[in-house]
Image (cartoon, rainbow, N blue to C red):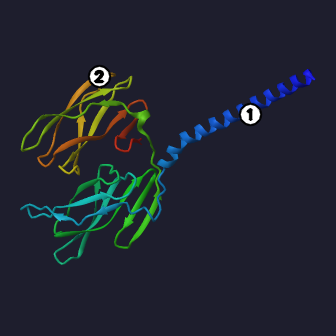
Protein backbone atom coordinates (compact mmCIF):
# COMPACT_ATOMS: atom_id res chain seq x y z
CA UNK A 1 0.00 0.00 0.00
CA UNK A 2 2.85 2.39 0.89
CA UNK A 3 4.62 1.52 -2.35
CA UNK A 4 1.45 2.31 -4.28
CA UNK A 5 1.17 5.65 -2.47
CA UNK A 6 4.76 6.48 -3.24
CA UNK A 7 4.27 5.64 -6.92
CA UNK A 8 1.12 7.74 -6.99
CA UNK A 9 2.89 10.62 -5.32
CA UNK A 10 5.75 10.30 -7.78
CA UNK A 11 3.36 10.24 -10.73
CA UNK A 12 1.57 13.35 -9.39
CA UNK A 13 4.87 15.20 -9.05
CA UNK A 14 5.83 14.31 -12.63
CA UNK A 15 2.46 15.52 -13.94
CA UNK A 16 2.72 18.78 -11.98
CA UNK A 17 6.28 19.38 -13.19
CA UNK A 18 5.29 18.74 -16.78
CA UNK A 19 2.35 21.13 -16.42
CA UNK A 20 4.59 23.85 -14.99
CA UNK A 21 7.05 23.41 -17.83
CA UNK A 22 4.27 23.67 -20.40
CA UNK A 23 2.83 26.76 -18.70
CA UNK A 24 6.29 28.29 -18.69
CA UNK A 25 6.69 27.64 -22.41
CA UNK A 26 3.32 29.22 -23.14
CA UNK A 27 4.17 32.21 -20.96
CA UNK A 28 7.47 32.72 -22.77
CA UNK A 29 5.70 32.53 -26.12
CA UNK A 30 3.14 35.08 -24.94
CA UNK A 31 5.90 37.42 -23.79
CA UNK A 32 7.60 37.19 -27.19
CA UNK A 33 4.32 37.86 -28.97
CA UNK A 34 3.66 40.89 -26.74
CA UNK A 35 7.10 42.22 -27.59
CA UNK A 36 6.36 41.93 -31.29
CA UNK A 37 2.92 43.56 -31.14
CA UNK A 38 4.19 47.17 -30.98
CA UNK A 39 6.29 46.55 -34.11
CA UNK A 40 3.26 45.19 -35.94
CA UNK A 41 1.17 48.20 -34.88
CA UNK A 42 3.75 50.58 -36.31
CA UNK A 43 3.20 49.18 -39.80
CA UNK A 44 0.83 51.55 -41.56
CA UNK A 45 -1.58 49.97 -44.01
CA UNK A 46 -2.34 52.58 -46.65
CA UNK A 47 -5.58 52.33 -48.58
CA UNK A 48 -8.06 54.68 -50.22
CA UNK A 49 -9.77 55.33 -46.88
CA UNK A 50 -6.74 56.82 -45.12
CA UNK A 51 -4.50 57.88 -48.03
CA UNK A 52 -5.71 61.51 -48.05
CA UNK A 53 -3.35 62.40 -45.23
CA UNK A 54 -2.76 66.08 -45.95
CA UNK A 55 -4.85 69.22 -45.97
CA UNK A 56 -3.44 71.72 -48.47
CA UNK A 57 -4.35 75.38 -48.17
CA UNK A 58 -4.90 77.88 -50.97
CA UNK A 59 -1.67 79.46 -52.25
CA UNK A 60 -1.08 82.93 -50.81
CA UNK A 61 0.65 85.59 -52.86
CA UNK A 62 3.83 86.77 -51.11
CA UNK A 63 5.28 88.58 -54.11
CA UNK A 64 7.40 91.66 -53.65
CA UNK A 65 7.85 94.44 -56.13
CA UNK A 66 10.11 92.40 -58.39
CA UNK A 67 7.59 91.51 -61.09
CA UNK A 68 7.69 87.77 -60.35
CA UNK A 69 5.04 85.70 -58.63
CA UNK A 70 5.85 84.07 -55.29
CA UNK A 71 3.35 82.02 -53.31
CA UNK A 72 3.31 80.07 -50.07
CA UNK A 73 0.98 77.21 -49.11
CA UNK A 74 -0.03 75.76 -45.76
CA UNK A 75 0.26 71.97 -45.37
CA UNK A 76 -1.25 70.09 -42.43
CA UNK A 77 -0.95 66.38 -41.62
CA UNK A 78 -4.51 65.33 -40.74
CA UNK A 79 -3.70 61.60 -40.52
CA UNK A 80 -2.57 59.43 -37.60
CA UNK A 81 0.83 58.57 -39.14
CA UNK A 82 4.01 60.37 -40.18
CA UNK A 83 4.33 61.64 -43.75
CA UNK A 84 7.75 62.20 -45.36
CA UNK A 85 9.14 63.40 -48.71
CA UNK A 86 6.11 65.57 -49.37
CA UNK A 87 5.61 67.17 -52.80
CA UNK A 88 2.90 69.68 -53.64
CA UNK A 89 1.71 69.60 -57.28
CA UNK A 90 0.28 72.78 -58.75
CA UNK A 91 -0.64 74.51 -61.98
CA UNK A 92 0.84 77.88 -62.83
CA UNK A 93 -1.71 80.16 -64.51
CA UNK A 94 -1.41 83.24 -66.67
CA UNK A 95 -3.58 86.36 -66.38
CA UNK A 96 -6.33 84.61 -68.40
CA UNK A 97 -6.30 81.61 -66.01
CA UNK A 98 -4.76 79.35 -68.64
CA UNK A 99 -2.35 76.66 -67.43
CA UNK A 100 1.12 77.51 -68.66
CA UNK A 101 3.23 75.25 -66.42
CA UNK A 102 2.76 72.18 -64.26
CA UNK A 103 5.12 72.31 -61.27
CA UNK A 104 5.81 70.80 -57.88
CA UNK A 105 7.54 71.89 -54.66
CA UNK A 106 9.31 69.74 -52.09
CA UNK A 107 8.76 69.92 -48.33
CA UNK A 108 11.95 68.66 -46.71
CA UNK A 109 10.61 67.70 -43.28
CA UNK A 110 8.57 64.82 -41.89
CA UNK A 111 5.18 65.92 -40.60
CA UNK A 112 3.81 64.08 -37.58
CA UNK A 113 0.03 63.93 -37.02
CA UNK A 114 -1.39 67.39 -36.45
CA UNK A 115 1.76 69.25 -37.51
CA UNK A 116 1.74 72.17 -39.94
CA UNK A 117 4.35 73.47 -42.36
CA UNK A 118 4.47 76.22 -44.95
CA UNK A 119 6.01 75.50 -48.33
CA UNK A 120 7.29 78.04 -50.85
CA UNK A 121 6.10 77.55 -54.42
CA UNK A 122 8.42 78.88 -57.11
CA UNK A 123 6.96 80.13 -60.38
CA UNK A 124 7.97 80.65 -63.97
CA UNK A 125 7.85 83.91 -65.88
CA UNK A 126 4.37 85.08 -66.94
CA UNK A 127 2.64 83.14 -64.15
CA UNK A 128 0.19 85.34 -62.25
CA UNK A 129 -1.47 82.78 -59.96
CA UNK A 130 -1.30 79.15 -58.90
CA UNK A 131 -3.73 76.32 -58.20
CA UNK A 132 -2.89 73.20 -56.17
CA UNK A 133 -3.77 70.05 -58.09
CA UNK A 134 -2.51 67.32 -55.76
CA UNK A 135 0.28 66.05 -53.57
CA UNK A 136 2.40 63.02 -52.83
CA UNK A 137 4.23 61.66 -49.81
CA UNK A 138 6.10 58.62 -48.58
CA UNK A 139 5.15 56.37 -45.71
CA UNK A 140 7.32 53.33 -45.07
CA UNK A 141 8.24 51.86 -48.44
CA UNK A 142 5.23 53.27 -50.28
CA UNK A 143 4.63 56.39 -52.33
CA UNK A 144 1.12 57.84 -52.18
CA UNK A 145 -0.04 60.19 -54.97
CA UNK A 146 -3.29 62.12 -54.50
CA UNK A 147 -4.83 63.90 -57.49
CA UNK A 148 -7.23 66.50 -56.09
CA UNK A 149 -8.65 67.50 -59.47
CA UNK A 150 -9.55 63.97 -60.50
CA UNK A 151 -10.17 62.78 -56.91
CA UNK A 152 -7.94 59.74 -57.46
CA UNK A 153 -5.37 57.97 -55.30
CA UNK A 154 -2.37 55.97 -56.48
CA UNK A 155 -0.31 53.85 -54.09
CA UNK A 156 3.05 52.59 -55.32
CA UNK A 157 5.59 50.23 -53.81
CA UNK A 158 8.95 51.96 -53.88
CA UNK A 159 12.26 50.12 -53.62
CA UNK A 160 13.72 52.45 -51.00
CA UNK A 161 16.09 51.14 -48.38
CA UNK A 162 14.47 52.53 -45.22
CA UNK A 163 15.30 51.12 -41.79
CA UNK A 164 15.22 52.00 -38.10
CA UNK A 165 17.88 54.63 -37.50
CA UNK A 166 19.16 53.24 -34.19
CA UNK A 167 22.01 51.17 -35.64
CA UNK A 168 23.09 54.03 -37.96
CA UNK A 169 23.04 56.95 -35.54
CA UNK A 170 26.54 58.42 -35.53
CA UNK A 171 26.10 61.73 -33.72
CA UNK A 172 25.24 62.84 -30.23
CA UNK A 173 23.51 66.21 -30.57
CA UNK A 174 23.06 68.62 -27.68
CA UNK A 175 20.07 70.86 -27.10
CA UNK A 176 20.07 73.99 -29.23
CA UNK A 177 21.25 77.01 -27.24
CA UNK A 178 20.38 80.58 -28.19
CA UNK A 179 23.40 82.87 -27.91
CA UNK A 180 22.14 86.10 -29.47
CA UNK A 181 18.86 87.78 -30.33
CA UNK A 182 18.38 90.19 -33.19
CA UNK A 183 15.59 91.65 -35.32
CA UNK A 184 17.41 90.25 -38.36
CA UNK A 185 17.52 86.70 -36.96
CA UNK A 186 18.64 84.89 -33.83
CA UNK A 187 21.96 83.11 -33.35
CA UNK A 188 22.15 79.61 -31.90
CA UNK A 189 24.80 77.01 -31.25
CA UNK A 190 24.62 73.23 -30.98
CA UNK A 191 27.30 70.70 -30.04
CA UNK A 192 27.79 67.47 -31.97
CA UNK A 193 29.91 64.44 -31.03
CA UNK A 194 31.09 61.55 -33.19
CA UNK A 195 29.90 58.30 -31.60
CA UNK A 196 31.55 55.99 -34.13
CA UNK A 197 35.07 54.53 -33.88
CA UNK A 198 35.95 56.08 -37.25
CA UNK A 199 36.10 59.49 -38.88
CA UNK A 200 32.95 61.10 -40.27
CA UNK A 201 32.93 63.34 -43.32
CA UNK A 202 30.36 65.60 -44.98
CA UNK A 203 28.25 65.96 -41.84
CA UNK A 204 25.17 68.10 -42.52
CA UNK A 205 22.54 69.09 -39.95
CA UNK A 206 18.94 69.55 -41.10
CA UNK A 207 17.60 72.51 -39.13
CA UNK A 208 13.94 73.53 -39.07
CA UNK A 209 12.68 77.02 -38.24
CA UNK A 210 9.34 77.33 -36.43
CA UNK A 211 7.05 80.30 -35.85
CA UNK A 212 5.32 81.24 -32.58
CA UNK A 213 2.58 78.68 -33.27
CA UNK A 214 5.09 75.84 -33.62
CA UNK A 215 4.57 75.59 -37.38
CA UNK A 216 7.48 74.84 -39.70
CA UNK A 217 8.34 77.81 -41.92
CA UNK A 218 11.78 76.95 -43.30
CA UNK A 219 14.27 74.08 -43.56
CA UNK A 220 18.02 74.77 -43.71
CA UNK A 221 20.97 72.43 -44.23
CA UNK A 222 24.00 73.42 -42.15
CA UNK A 223 27.24 71.69 -43.22
CA UNK A 224 30.21 70.91 -40.99
CA UNK A 225 33.20 71.38 -43.27
CA UNK A 226 35.80 69.44 -41.28
CA UNK A 227 36.32 65.71 -40.70
CA UNK A 228 34.95 64.68 -37.32
CA UNK A 229 37.29 62.27 -35.54
CA UNK A 230 36.11 59.50 -33.18
CA UNK A 231 34.74 60.95 -29.90
CA UNK A 232 35.50 64.48 -31.13
CA UNK A 233 33.09 67.26 -30.17
CA UNK A 234 32.50 70.43 -32.15
CA UNK A 235 30.09 73.38 -32.06
CA UNK A 236 27.98 74.37 -35.06
CA UNK A 237 26.56 77.88 -35.34
CA UNK A 238 23.04 78.48 -36.64
CA UNK A 239 21.53 81.77 -37.79
CA UNK A 240 17.75 81.82 -38.17
CA UNK A 241 15.58 84.10 -40.28
CA UNK A 242 13.79 87.04 -38.69
CA UNK A 243 10.43 85.20 -38.90
CA UNK A 244 11.61 82.26 -36.77
CA UNK A 245 10.67 81.96 -33.10
CA UNK A 246 12.90 78.91 -32.51
CA UNK A 247 14.86 76.23 -34.34
CA UNK A 248 14.86 72.44 -34.15
CA UNK A 249 17.30 69.77 -35.36
CA UNK A 250 15.11 67.39 -37.36
CA UNK A 251 17.81 65.24 -38.99
CA UNK A 252 21.35 64.93 -40.27
CA UNK A 253 23.43 63.12 -42.85
CA UNK A 254 27.00 61.86 -43.18
CA UNK A 255 29.17 59.81 -45.50
CA UNK A 256 30.05 56.24 -44.60
CA UNK A 257 33.47 55.75 -46.27
CA UNK A 258 33.59 52.01 -45.57
CA UNK A 259 30.42 51.25 -47.52
CA UNK A 260 30.70 54.30 -49.80
CA UNK A 261 27.15 55.44 -49.06
CA UNK A 262 25.42 58.55 -47.77
CA UNK A 263 23.42 57.97 -44.60
CA UNK A 264 20.46 60.27 -43.90
CA UNK A 265 18.91 60.17 -40.43
CA UNK A 266 15.36 61.44 -39.87
CA UNK A 267 15.14 62.28 -36.16
CA UNK A 268 11.36 62.75 -36.32
CA UNK A 269 10.46 59.35 -37.72
CA UNK A 270 13.58 57.60 -36.37
CA UNK A 271 14.26 56.19 -39.81
CA UNK A 272 17.37 56.08 -41.98
CA UNK A 273 17.69 56.26 -45.74
CA UNK A 274 20.77 54.82 -47.46
CA UNK A 275 21.82 56.45 -50.72
CA UNK A 276 24.36 54.40 -52.67
Residue 7 lies, in percent from the top left, at 88, 25
Residue 122 location (% of width, % of height):
21, 60
Compared to residue 211, the image places residue 49 above or below, namely: below
Viewer-nearest of discs 1 and 2:
1
Percent of width and height locating residue 214: 22, 49
Q: Nearer the viewer, residue 17 or 54?
A: 17
Q: Residue furthest right?
A: 1
Quadrant of the image for the N terminus?
top right
Q: Would you place residue 142 above or below residue 229 in this image?
A: below
The picture places residue 241, in percent across and down from the top left corner, at 14, 46
The secondary structure type at the circle numbered 1 is: helix
Cα distance between the residues tagged 1 and 2: 57 Å
Relative to 158, 245 lies left or right: left
Q: Work out whether residue 186 or residue 29 is closer to the camera in this orientation and state it.
A: 29
Rendered-image quadrant of the C terminus: top left
**Residue topped by disc 1:** 19
Tag 2 secondary structure: loop
Give 27 or 4, whichever is nearer the viewer.
Answer: 4
Q: Which disc is residue 232 wearing?
A: 2
- Looking at this view, name the residue that lies furthest to the front: 1
Crowding at dot 1, Cα within 10 Å, few <14 / some 14-19 / many 20+, comes out as few
Furthest residue in direction bottom, as rendered: 96
Count of marks, rendered view? 2
71 relative to 30 in the view: left or right: left
Q: Is residue 95 above or below residue 248?
A: below
Which residue is rendered at x = 34% and y = 50% of the image? 112
Sequence-first tag of 1 and 2: 1
Amino acid sequence: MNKLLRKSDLLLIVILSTTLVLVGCVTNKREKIQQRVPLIKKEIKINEKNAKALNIGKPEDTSKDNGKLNTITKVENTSNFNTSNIYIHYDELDKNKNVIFKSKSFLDVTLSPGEVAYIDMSHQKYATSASVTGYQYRVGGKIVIVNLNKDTIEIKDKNIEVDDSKTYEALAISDVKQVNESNEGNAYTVKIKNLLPKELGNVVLKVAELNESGEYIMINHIPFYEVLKPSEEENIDIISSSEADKVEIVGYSYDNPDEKVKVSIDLKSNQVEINK
